[in-house]
Amino acid sequence: AAGVIQSPRHLIKEKRETATLKCYPIPRHDTVYWYQQGPGQDPQFLISFYEKMQSDKGSIPDRFSAQQFSDYHSELNMSSLELGDSALYFCASSPRAPGDGYTFGSGTRLTVV
Amino acid sequence: GQQVMQIPQYQHVQEGEDFTTYCNSSTTLSNIQWYKQRPGGHPVFLIQLVKSGEVKKQKRLTFQFGEAKKNSSLHITATQTTDVGTYFCARVTSGSRLTFGEGTQLTVNP
């Protein structure tokens, strides 16, 4: 079965640079979520989209923005990168009634140097 | 806040021993989900509990939801090295976001 696809798997950027992370959700899953996970931490919710509209917003810095496109893929744009932005970024998708849980992608490991 | 508290933070067991992790909330939970994250991996959904006192089993894993729906537990019988990872409980909150507990990191010595 198709899973949630994220790219790239690894990304190294310098401070103050910009990064774009991509996510392709499971077909027919109508909600996409972005999470940030620091070392030894639990995943922290950033933002979500339902049917291409932003549906919820968490602790996402103003330097970050995200959108969902007509083909349902989503992109997380991160500008003015800081060392503290180094983390694993997961995308997840779920159907409207998530009784079967959320499906996470393999993540993008962002390292800011 | 609406955080679910999870204990213990770390658990080291010998292969064959049992393991339990607990989630506690100060408020009533409408549901609780459990995820497993292998080292270097991503969270993988295990189960969702919604009913008061619910007990569900998956092979050696037993999941319970408290009668008051304020706590939940995951019990693994006779751990194996393949059980290594971090186990998270999570609640679905407003806007359908998942809010995770801090996780319990399980290591199994062969």
Image (cartoon, coloured by chain):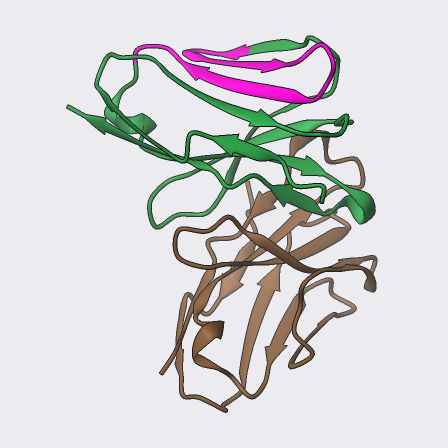
Q: In the image, is residue A4 above or below residue A36?
A: above
**Residue in the picture at 69% in, 50% down:** A27
Q: Position of residue A8 (x, y in %)?
A: 45, 70
Q: Colour of chain B?
A: green
* Left or right placement of residue A5 versus residue A113 in this view: right
**Residue in the picture at 72% in, 18% down:** B69
Chain shaded brown: A
Number of labels in the image equals: 0
Q: Quadrant of residue B71?
A: top right
* Left or right placement of residue B99 versus residue A41 in this view: right
Q: Residue furthest bottom?
A: A16
**Quadrant where the N terminus of chain A lies?**
top right
Q: In the image, is residue A33 above or below residue B86?
A: below
A93 magenta-colored: no
Viewer-proximal residue among B22 and A67:
B22
Q: Position of residue A55 (x, y in %)?
A: 83, 58
Magenta highlight range: B57-78
Q: In the image, is residue B3 above or below residue A91?
A: above
**Quadrant where the C terminus of chain A lies?**
bottom left
* Left or right placement of residue B84 versus residue B42 in this view: left
Viewer-proximal residue among A28 and B18:
B18
Viewer-proximal residue among A108 and A95:
A108
Q: Position of residue B33 (x, y in %)?
A: 62, 30
B76 magenta-colored: yes
**Residue in the picture at 51% in, 84% down:** A81
Q: Residue furthest left?
A: B110
